[in-house]
């Protein structure tokens, strides 16, 4: 199953236990295909770099290398108009549309307020785990 994972879910999965960590573990076991764009990867790297200063005992670099080596990278077109009330979130929707991915996993309230966009469902990590990883 192809999924787009919002940055907040990735970070939560790296640093904490719970549904985001279960999602990352499922990806590592090959149960999920992580789909990203270059813009999403840039955001992953920027946020991880900031957090690595605060949590030097967690080797974020290895996780990011795994992501780059084991994800599907797409080049989406920009959306014709902003879908989310936070236009910075549109990159996740554009990535899903470009890759025919049906699910975005997010903890972002602006994305979750949409609940869906065209044929893409936007779900919380808990909802995703309950529906797909039980």
Image (cartoon, rainbow, N blue to C red):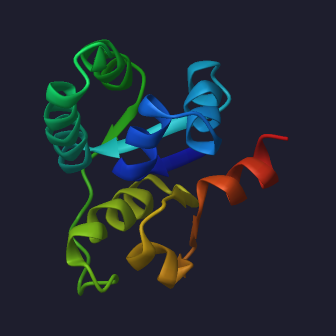
The residue that appears at 22% across and 17% down in the rendered structure is 56
Instruction: Give the side of residue 90 with respect to residue 27, left or right.
Output: left
- Locate the C terminus by quadrant: top right
State the image quarter where residue 29 is shown. Answer: top right
Q: Is residue 46 above or below residue 90?
A: above
Residue 127 x %, y %: 71, 59
Residue extending farthest to the right is: 134
Instruction: Give the side of residue 105 with respect to residue 62, left or right.
Output: right
The residue that appears at 30% across and 86% down in the rendered structure is 85
Residue 120 x %, y %: 55, 69
The residue that appears at 30% across and 23% down in the rendered structure is 64
Q: Is residue 56 above or below residue 116?
A: above
Residue 53 appears in the figure: yes
Residue 42 x %, y %: 16, 42
Q: Is residue 98 above or below residue 69?
A: below
The tally of labels here is 0
């Amino acid at each position: 199953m192809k999924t787009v994972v919002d940055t907040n879910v990735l970070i939560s999965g790296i640093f904490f236990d719970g549904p985001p960590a279960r999602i990352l573990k499922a990806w590592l076991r090959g149960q999920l295909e992580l789909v990203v764009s270059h813009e999403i990867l840039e955001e992953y790297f920027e946020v991880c770099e900031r957090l690595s200063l605060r949590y030097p005992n967690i080797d974020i670099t290895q996780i990011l290398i795994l992501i780059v080596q084991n994800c599907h990278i797409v080049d989406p077109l920009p959306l014709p108009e902003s879908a989310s009330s936070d236009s910075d979130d549109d990159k996740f929707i554009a990535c899903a549309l470009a890759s025919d991915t049906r699910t975005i996993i997010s903890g972002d309230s602006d994305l979750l307020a949409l609940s869906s966009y065209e044929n893409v469902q936007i779900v919380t990590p808990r909802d995703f785990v309950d529906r797909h990883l039980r």
